[in-house]
Image: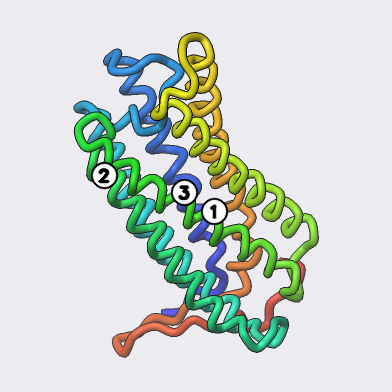
Amino acid sequence: MEFRGLGFVPLFIAFWCTAWVAVSYTLTVIYGHAPLLMYISDTGNYYPENITFKIGFLGMSNANLFLALLQYNFILLHAEAFGARQPMIQKILLAMGITSCIGTAVLAVFETDFYPVTHRVGAFFAFAFGCVYNLWQAILLYEVPGIRRAICHIRMVSSAMAFIGVITFIGCRVSVFTNLCTGDYEKIIEIISISTEWFMLLLILIQLVTCFQPMQHLSLTVSWKGYTICKRENQDSAV
């Protein structure tokens, strides 16, 4: 069985992420388990929304793992556009992508209210490693022939903003945990960190959509012997 063009993979992940976040948020508000302005993690602390939270994040973790493998093969198949060291760098980046997926699974399983340290460690690996990974892949995308410059620009800007967002979020949380900000300042920092987290989620969705065109350059062949990922044949470079 051959799948010519794998652009449906990132689009599916984007749809999946949007759907389960919307459901989890709605259930959390309906049952009054958190205020309207809440962290994404607050949608996974109590029943019944913690069910959709776990299913959503675990599904996203596995889907992103598959996408990371596709992106790894995509870069290797276009290795002629990069330097000789890029295959080794891609192995390191793939390891970072896998670590990010593991972190996503950890934060899904361990709720923030009941396992705060484990949840935050998982979230750190998920967002920090994921942002570094996506930023580097966005830089490389400029060297790949047949990719629209608009797609490259959108992916680069969203990846860079997500990277800045991670630094901002970590800075806000550290200031709260270390009591550097108190009173009204603490409330302001809390609002900034919550808004930053939701904004980063939006940027991740944008990055996923920009993966559509590059993934359309790949074909997946599955048989009883295994699977093969290769360049898509007879494709229009503007696809």
Point out which mark residue 118 bears.
2
Label 1 residue SS: helix
Which one is earlier in the sequence, the residue at label 2 or at label 1?
2
Residue nearest the viewer, comparing 7 with 90: 90
Q: Residue at x 45, y 63 (%)?
A: 97
Provide residue 192's location: percent of width, then percent of height.
Answer: 55, 25
Question: Marks 3 and 1: CB-CB under 8 Å?
Answer: yes
Q: Nearer the viewer, residue 199 or 6?
A: 199
Q: Amino acid at mark 3?
A: Phe
Calculate the distance from the C-alpha at mark 3 to the C-alpha at mark 1: 6 Å
In the rendered view, tell whether residue 204 sits above or below residue 26: below
Residue under label 3, please give it. Answer: 127
The N terminus is located in which quarter? bottom left
Residue 173: image location, x then y, percent = 45, 32
Secondary element at image label 2: helix
N-terminal of the two: label 2 or label 3? 2
Q: Nearer the viewer, residue 156 or 215?
A: 156
Q: Kindly identify the residue that appears in the image at 54 percent across and 17 percent down.
A: 188
Q: Nearer the viewer, residue 226 or 88?
A: 88
- Residue on which disc 1 sits: 131
